[in-house]
Amino acid sequence: MNETASERAAMWDARYEPAPYAYGEAANAFLVAQAPRLERGMRALVPGDGEGRNGVWLAEQGLVVDTLDLSAQGVAKARRLAAVRGVSLNAAQADALAWAWPREAYDVVALIYLHLAADERRFIHGRALAALRPGGLLILEAFRPEQLAAHAAGARGGPREARLLYTVADLAADFAGQEIVELAEASAVLDEGALHVGASAVVRAVVRKV
């Protein structure tokens, strides 16, 4: 059964309330690898940014950054992290499924481990594309179904339900008609706080809006 937004928010609040950053304070490595594609002054959006590690990193690169998260605890920690790092971050508590997405407002949308059921995934990906300016980049990393086996081998990270994991075919369908700069399965050894650890099965995409 699908959780309500308030139930999701409560779950993430409980995860983010403890003092340590659940997924660490460093940005996702795949996002960092996209640095050569980024330029100072670009406007970026990071839905589901949790405690802010990815949005803060983008702000450190000189981008103007908006982030969203359901969790009030996560947003508060994102703001604290930005203050410690000395950057400006517009972090809002919001449900990306209900948020009033702007059109053609961003140069970059980063979707890092934002896992949703198929209908919600397609909705968010459609809104993300619409929010990009022509030529803008969507950067995505998510766990794929093989992550369930990685869990059994001791890795930490990702949903325990196959319906919330993404495949290359899913993403190819969601982004059909756009320029696929990169779309591939990968194996990653994650070291992101206490909750993304070990050899993991991921899918990665860089998509340019036509």
Image (cartoon, rainbow, N blue to C red):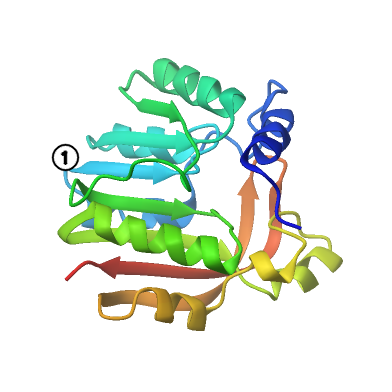
Q: In this rendered view, identify the residue nearer to me: 17 or 81.
A: 17
x then y, percent, for residue 137: 26, 60
Q: Position of residue 187 (x, y in %)?
A: 60, 72
**In the rendering, at what x and y percent does residue 45 appear?**
33, 43
Q: Nearer the viewer, residue 142 or 48?
A: 48
Q: Is residue 120 placed above or below 182 in the rendered structure?
A: above
Q: Residues within 10 Å of mark 1 (few under 14, many from 20)?
A: few
| Closer-to-camera residue (110/198) | 110
- Say whether residue 202 is left or right of residue 46: right
Location of residue 204 with respect to 194 vertically, above or below: below
Looking at the figure, which quarter contains the N terminus? bottom right
Q: Is residue 164 left or right of residue 69?
A: right
In the displayed structure image, the side of residue 143 where residue 135 appears, left or right: left
Measuring 33% from the left and 34% from the top, which residue is drawn there?
A: 66
Residue drawn at x 39%, y 32% as measured from the top left? 56
Q: Position of residue 6 (x, y in %)?
A: 66, 35
| Residue at the (14%, 38%) spot, across then down | 41
In the displayed structure, 131 sits above or below 118; it is above
The quarter of the rendered structure image containing the C terminus is bottom left
Asked if residue 36 shows in the view, the reply is no
Q: Give amino acid for label 1.
A: Arg
The number of numbered discs placed on residues in the rendered structure image is: 1
Residue at numbered disc 1: 40
Residue drawn 72% across and 41% down?
Answer: 194
Q: Is residue 178 visible?
A: yes
Q: Quadrant of residue 2?
A: bottom right
State the image quarter where residue 87 is shown: top left
